[in-house]
Image (cartoon, rainbow, N blue to C red):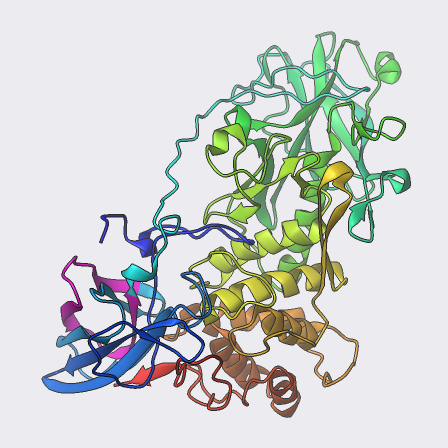
Amino acid sequence: MEVFNNKYSMTSLYKIVFLFPLLTIIGCSSSDSSSTTTTSNGAVETCFDVEVTNAGNSQTQNICTTLENGGYNGLGVARFIKFSVSSSNTSVSVRATRTSGLNPADPDIYLFKNGAIINYAESTQSNTEFLTVSNLGVGEYVVEINEYGYLSSSDKQILNTTLSQKTTGTLQDETTKGIEAVFQAPSSCNATGEFNVTGNVKFTRVPHSGTSLDYAASVNVPAQGVVVEVFCDDGIYNEDSLVVTNSDGDYTISFPSNQNAYIQVRAQMKSTNPLYDFSVVDNTSGQAPYVMQKGPYIAVDSTGASSFDTDFLAGSGWSIPSSEYTGARSAAPFAILDSIRLAKDKVAGAGATTFPTLKINWSENNTTASGDITLGQIGTSYFNGTEIYLLGAADNDTDEYDGHVIIHEWGHYFEHNFSRADSIGGPHSSSDILDMRVAFSEGFGNAFSGMVTGDPKYIDVSGDDQGIGFLINVENNSCSNPGWFSECSVQSILYDMEDSDADTNDTVDLTFTQIFNVLNGEQRTTPAFTSIFSFTKEIKDFTGVINGIDVLTSAQSIDPILDIYGDSETTNNPGATDQLPVHVAF
């Protein structure tokens, strides 16, 4: 086994993305073969005798993994077991010994409580692994076993990049002058005789037509809740007085008398009630902030300021005659913020009052190539556990107008800060048979984008002239491989829980507040891994809506969910390797 940082100390990248070095193990029938075994469909299957000794009592069961569903995050790559500790200071040991399959095998063992890793064993010893933990407290525990030998070389690569930090940046279009924004320092301009100026901020939104951007149908819309500042004497004049635009994009701000100053609009939304700070920055320029500025202006009073041009329009930069970007893409950061505003409002409306600070890294250099993120080689749009990265390269993949993509990634930010996501990330699609943790997180992100926008159509444009792409209808109940392992099934179930439209199998009409309360409560502290099982059991208990939800899950080939671990799932067992029970009980 190669030496690498433990996977659980790293952060998964989200949205159809490359990922980390790690795998997990799954159950199957016992075998004593010493050669590599294959399933009926030709997939390699590796099995282990797993012995758990809990407070001196030992039990052994045979558990198998398989690569038949592909990737390190496919169903069958990971296998879970569960046990309970009934008294404090209990010692527990877990031993995995190869019985068939890959030879040599390289199993690893991870112990969790409430989604947090307690301890792990990752030795390089062939065909066996052993973990012992002392002084465990009372509670329920989950163990994951994985086979490192299943990892491809690309899976084993860890992306370690250093992001250079800078403190200045510019953004300009045809109507604004861009200057460096030295945003840390307060202004030394004199406030005596200051007066108010008013203005308006808009940006150009480019809508979709099918799975393409329709530049001819572009509209100018208010930039709501964005920060407006006066920049005077190399500092922020109104640093202690937060000024943001209203729902019409209007603002009123104090301006210094008889002193040269600029008016500056920052691609940032900030508030103290509820508390949040969301900003769009350029990851290819040391996370420089995006700003628009006009000036310098000088006037003694508001009468003299009547000649100021205080209205801002952040244009798309697209030339319809040339069918290409010929100007600065000033609208992009503000379009991104506008989508995040919708998501923030949805969650705040459910009762959230404090949002952790978030940077959204966007650049017109951000491409689907993977490599140095400071050069824009981000691979895909994703949330890394701290910040969001969004694609922006023209004729490659741009996401600034793909509101559902942005909200999906913000949905992972939501999971990370308001709920819990045990997803290990990795490549995924609607038809994949996935690790249940990945299926729930990605399905939630898609469904959440529909809940926020009120539109079930998730569109992601790409290609020449942003003219191709794909569409996912999260309300579509027809999935290629329905089940507890399908992000398609998860998104369909979650969206139908919240939407008010009654359709086939959907009589459920929950509020987002109810969903939020479970995600922010029971799902956040569940002793099980986060999955469709843990969420559905708790939402049924919380709302008392049983039959309608059972109909939704049954329509996706999931047995009525009666517990957080999926013990009630006895029917849907895809592939040649046994995937049930979801958790082997010890």
Question: On the rendered structure, is 313 left or right of 277?
Answer: right
Whether residue 472 is situated above or below residue 476 in the rendered picture:
above
Q: Quadrant of the N terminus?
A: bottom left
Q: Report the residue at 70% width, 13% height from top.
A: 261
As drawn, the residue found furthest toward the left would be: 56
Looking at this view, is 204 or 137 the one in front? 204
Q: Residue at x 64, y 49 (%)?
A: 406
**The magenta stretch spans residue 141:** yes
Q: Check the image and report above or below for 107 versus 204.
A: below
| Residue 316, image x, y percentages | 78, 32
- Which of the pair 117/167 is nearer the observer? 117
Q: Based on the displayed image, in which of its 4 quarters is residue 324 positioned?
A: top right
Res 303 seen here = no
Q: Is residue 9 above or below residue 419?
A: above
x, y (%) of residue 444?
Answer: 58, 65
Magenta stretch, main secondary structure, is strand
Horizontal placement of 92 versus 191: left or right? left
Above or below, comparing residue 283 to residue 492 in the picture: above
Q: Which residues are magenta?
A: 117-146
- Quadrant occupied by the C terminus: bottom left
In the rendering, at what x and y percent does residue 43 appear?
A: 40, 71
In depth, the one of 103 and 540 nearer the eye is 103
Residue at 54% x, 24% y is 285
- Where residue 323 appears, as percent x and y from the top left, is 84, 31
- Judge whether residue 33 can be spotted in this image: yes
- For residue 160, what is the image quadrant? top left
The one nearer the camera, 266 or 490, is 490
